[in-house]
Image: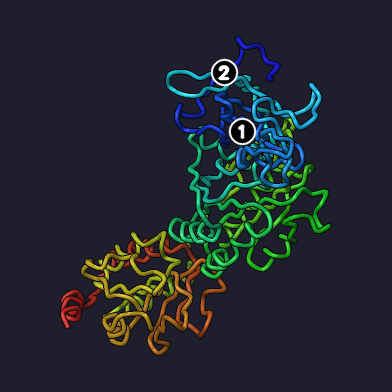
């Protein structure tokens, strides 16, 4: 029985009166205690829900009659037996057997008395979870299991405080695609939580989706205990090697690591380089007590303002092309997502149709008077027609994918923050390295002071959509 004084026990309801049939056992929780509740010989008993052999859940076992004629609670994994009311093994001594908890049958259900919860120590996982939420990673998609319990508990604490939302999934692949989509739509990472081994590798397809689309994402994978890594333990996989090609940052969390700094680096790299940050959490490291001076980190003083203005010469060159144009057309790629408000304002000033790449579909409403549809093989004839009729293409945040099919014969201005995207596939007339929203606003402000005559293409757009 529990050695806690009865007056100090906390009584938790664990089952309804008719929920557990005579001669049966089930797993229940009372606070943070995992309990096997038995109903045998018209009595209820509650014992610790783990077999001392390998931690097997006794609540998933059964009460069976043994060769000795007695009934025993039998472990479902290896057949160890325990008395269903006392928790003692066959021939057990008074000091052996399962930890037992007092049970009360009340009018509204079955109650189990458990010790009060001790103060929860702050762990390595808490430091990292606090740092994660400080950086604004507030959505976690995942599955909780045997090798990520310490980290999962730290995330639970953050959710209880209202700092994040946890979304349980039925397959880790769903979590990977969820955080990939989240990164594409918001420009900020969400996290996926998995166990070791196949739970972690189930993320890979979805993380490749994030990689090829430069979407920020955060993968938090459990791992076997570090003392058995590399010696063929259950679900021991070299996760560093498995994730190397799909991540922009991947590190293992050790007991002596700078834990807050590791989480900061994973998130910062993910955001700045546009890809997957990955942290590997050995099972035994997760619940280790954090030193009192281990503080969580935040982005304060760690992130520069990314809204970069283009160089003066590049801006001047682009404006010279704009001033000569009569029928400009804007093409917006996925890289223009965060600046679409300013892009549309510029389009309205220029009377210019706006088409998107396939990946950017929906960044301008289909009902907008200047919306010209989608470019390329998966696109619309309307977009293709206006591209061929344009005397200037203004391309925001697009990599000129062959799927998009941007006309190389039309004078083009390309705007992007990534120098590797600029003129990636062929020479471009005017290259502008700068933030999409900042550059679009500079174009609009400068052109507002000039008397320019852009053709109003709205009537043509409406007519083309009627075809």
- Per the image, label 2 sits on a secondary structure element best described as strand
User: Where is residue 147 drawn, in percent x and y?
Assistant: 68, 47
Which residue occupies the foreground of this view, 122 or 65?
Answer: 65
Tell me which residue sits at (68%, 19%) in the image.
Answer: 2
Residue 366 seen from this side? yes
Tell me which label, 1 or 2, sits earlier in the chain. 2
| Quarter containing the C terminus | bottom left
Count the labels in the image: 2
Tell me which residue sits at (41%, 62%) in the image.
Answer: 337
User: Where is residue 274 drawn, in percent x and y?
Assistant: 56, 62
Residue under label 1: 36
Residue 295 left/right relative to 308: right
User: Which image quarter: residue 200?
Assistant: bottom right
User: Where is residue 368 drawn, in percent x and y?
Assistant: 23, 66
Tell me which residue sits at (51%, 79%) in the image.
Answer: 423
Vertical side of 441 occupied by 290: above or below: above
| Quarter containing the N terminus | top right
Cβ atoms at labels 1 and 2 below 8 Å apart: no
Which residue occupies the foreground of this view, 20 or 394?
Answer: 20
Residue 14 left/right relative to 446: right
Vertical side of 302 occupied by 379: above or below: below
User: Which image quarter: residue 440?
Assistant: bottom left
Which residue occupies the foreground of this view, 314 or 116?
Answer: 116
């Amino acid at each position: 029985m529990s050695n806690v004084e009865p007056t100090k026990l906390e009584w938790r309801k664990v089952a309804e009166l008719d929920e557990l049939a005579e001669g049966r056992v089930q797993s229940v929780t009372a606070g943070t205690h995992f309990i096997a509740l038995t109903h045998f010989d018209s009595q209820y008993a509650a014992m610790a829900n783990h077999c001392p052999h390998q931690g097997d859940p006794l609540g998933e076992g059964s009460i069976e009659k043994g060769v000795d004629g007695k009934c025993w609670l039998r472990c479902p994994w290896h057949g160890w037996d325990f008395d269903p009311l006392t928790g003692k093994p066959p021939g057990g001594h008074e000091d052996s057997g399962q930890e037992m908890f007092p049970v009360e049958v009340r009018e509204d259900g079955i109650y189990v008395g458990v010790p009060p919860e001790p103060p929860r120590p702050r762990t390595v996982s808490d430091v990292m979870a606090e740092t994660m939420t400080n950086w604004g990673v507030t959505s976690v998609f995942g599955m909780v299991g045997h090798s990520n319990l310490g980290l999962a508990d730290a995330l639970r604490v953050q959710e209880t405080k209202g700092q994040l939302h946890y979304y349980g999934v039925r397959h880790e692949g769903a979590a990977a695609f969820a955080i990939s989509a989240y990164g594409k739509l918001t420009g900020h990472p969400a996290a996926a939580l998995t166990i070791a081994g196949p739970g972690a590798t189930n993320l890979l397809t979805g993380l490749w989706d994030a990689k090829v689309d430069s979407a920020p994402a955060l993968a938090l994978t459990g791992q076997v205990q570090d003392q058995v890594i590399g010696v063929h333990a259950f679900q021991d996989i070299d996760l560093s090697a498995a994730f190397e090609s799909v991540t922009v940052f991947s590190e293992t969390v050790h007991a002596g690591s700078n834990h807050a700094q590791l989480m900061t680096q994973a998130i910062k790299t993910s955001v700045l380089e546009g890809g997957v940050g990955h942290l590997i959490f050995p099972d035994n490291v997760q619940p280790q007590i954090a030193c009192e001076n281990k503080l969580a980190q935040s982005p304060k003083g760690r992130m520069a303002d990314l809204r970069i203005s283009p160089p003066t010469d590049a801006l001047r060159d682009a404006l010279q092309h704009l001033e000569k144009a009569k029928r400009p057309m804007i093409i917006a790629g996925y890289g223009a997502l965060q600046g679409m408000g300013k892009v549309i304002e510029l389009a309205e000033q220029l009377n210019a149709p706006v088409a998107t790449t396939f990946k950017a579909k929906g960044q301008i409403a289909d009902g907008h008077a200047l919306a010209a549809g989608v470019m390329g093989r998966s696109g619309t004839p309307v977009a293709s027609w206006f591209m061929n009729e344009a005397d200037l293409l203004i391309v925001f945040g697009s990599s000129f994918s062959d799927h998009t099919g941007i006309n190389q014969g039309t004078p083009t201005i390309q705007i992007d923050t990534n120098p590797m995207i600029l003129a990636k596939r062929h020479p471009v007339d005017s290259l502008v390295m700068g933030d999409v929203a900042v550059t679009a606003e500079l174009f609009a402000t400068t052109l507002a002071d000039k008397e320019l005559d852009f053709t109003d293409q709205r009537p043509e757009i409406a007519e083309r959509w009627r075809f």
